[in-house]
Image (tube, coloured by chain):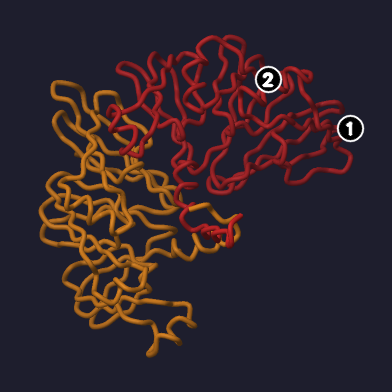
Chain colours: A orange, B red
Amino acid sequence: MQIDLQHRPSQAMAHVVLTPGESVTAESGAMVGMTPNVQVQTGSGGLLKGIKRMFGGESFFRNTFICSQGSEVGEVYLAATLPGDLVVLDVGASKYYLQNHAYVASTPGVDVDTRVGGFKTFLSGEGLFVLKTTGQGQVIAGAFGAIEEVRVRGEYIVDTGHLVAWEDSLQFRITKAADGWISSWLSGEGLVCHFTGNGTLWTQTRNPSEYGEEIGRRLPPRES
Amino acid sequence: MQTEILQRPDFSMVRATFERAGEAIVATAGTMVSRDTSVQMKTGLTGGLLASAKRKLLGGESLFLNTFTASAPGETVYLAPAAEGDLAEFRVRSGESLFIHSGAFLAGETTVKLDTKWGGAKGFFGAGMFLLKAEGEGRVLVNAYGALHPVDVSGQGFICDNENIVAFTDGLQYDVRRIGGMKGLFFSGEGLVCHFRGRGRLWMQTRNPARFAAWVHPFRRVKAKAQGGD
């Protein structure tokens, strides 16, 4: 399998080349185009996994794109919804956590599991769920805006809305941005992710929720 | 007329510089950024009322196309589409027409005819996707939501999400279908795709406007329930 990223950084799209029998799993709706020898299988990877993803605000189903046996190589183009960059993470020696909306695609050897990222986040409505990758292969993560790589030595704080991914060598806990809930709320920062340890993390230069609210409050109310 | 695409790729804009009086460019309503005061703008029912109405009804394209006509050489008009993304210029010749996704048409020379009536459009009517056929002789400017990605189609063909199609050449046959069967249609999120066959070139856009709209929707506030009966 070959993954190359095109049209970086603002309009990044992943071009995945599959040999016969190879497959790639992607977030629902990520497919831009593909060759006809690629078969699409829609599945949840298990009911519980699908339900957990739904709680995390993702889609219940994911699509697996399989290159037919005995054919030529297959091609699949994948992209995220919002404008921005993509990053390919090699899972194996390093394992990663992804902010759940950053997931675009993964290779079959990678297990992507939805987890609750700390109980306090559960009550807040922001960055409640994270994805943990294990196994062997590659994960494609998408960002809203540009991606900034940060090497953490010791301690570091990132707004949950600006998180893309981080190495599992970093311990993390979700906390209020300021000491009290009220000042936290007033600061506009809401929740932050507090990291400790040594490792790399990736941030996105724009916050999707901030952007969505900026547009959403200007739109006429919806019925439901 | 000279055309130059500026500020590529993220926030592209086209500058048309007229070389003689009477020269004109036709553009989708609302796309003008600026122009010299001496350039005449006529909001036209290009091709007559009936042709425009047909375009509106069948092509989903703006009923009004504005025609910008030069009164002297050297005058300019700048045009840009609504969404962020790239622009491309194509030259249409007789026998080499171009199919353009409605909404991707930015502008064209007056010698280019935009048609919505041709054989084979049927598949798209049910799909909520409409195409314009640019015929004749001249330049057309096409806009993409995101980057513009060309795919040379031959041999086994190519499948593209309907919402990611920008334009394709005349040599391609196409049919609209669902991927992954019924379950695929409702749950895959990919909806309808277009299967291209034959030889030609397809241009895709890297972002999907329908998917973006669906992303924004949950951020809208919910309408307060009416109180005390109606």
* Chain identity of mark 1: B
Q: Which mark is residue B71?
A: 1
Residues B166 and B127: in front is B127
Q: Name the residue furthest bottom.
A: A179
Position of B17 relative to B175 (above/below): below
Helix or strand or loop: what does disc 1 sit on? loop
Residue at 25% over, 66% down = A166
Residue at 14% over, 62% down = A94
Left or right: residue B91 versus residue A187 is right
Helix or strand or loop: what does disc 2 sit on? helix
Circles 1 and 2 on the same subunit: yes
Query: Residue A147: x percent and y percent?
Result: 38, 61
Query: Residue A51: x percent and y percent?
Result: 23, 53
Q: Which mark is residue B54?
A: 2
The answer to which image quadrant residue B112 occupies is top right
Position of B112 relative to A17 (above/below): above
**Quadrant including the N terminus of chain A:** top left
Residues A199 and B82: in front is B82
Q: Give whichever of discs 1 and 2 has the lower sequence position.
A: 2
Left or right: residue A124 versus residue A211 is left
Position of B163 relative to A133 (above/below): above
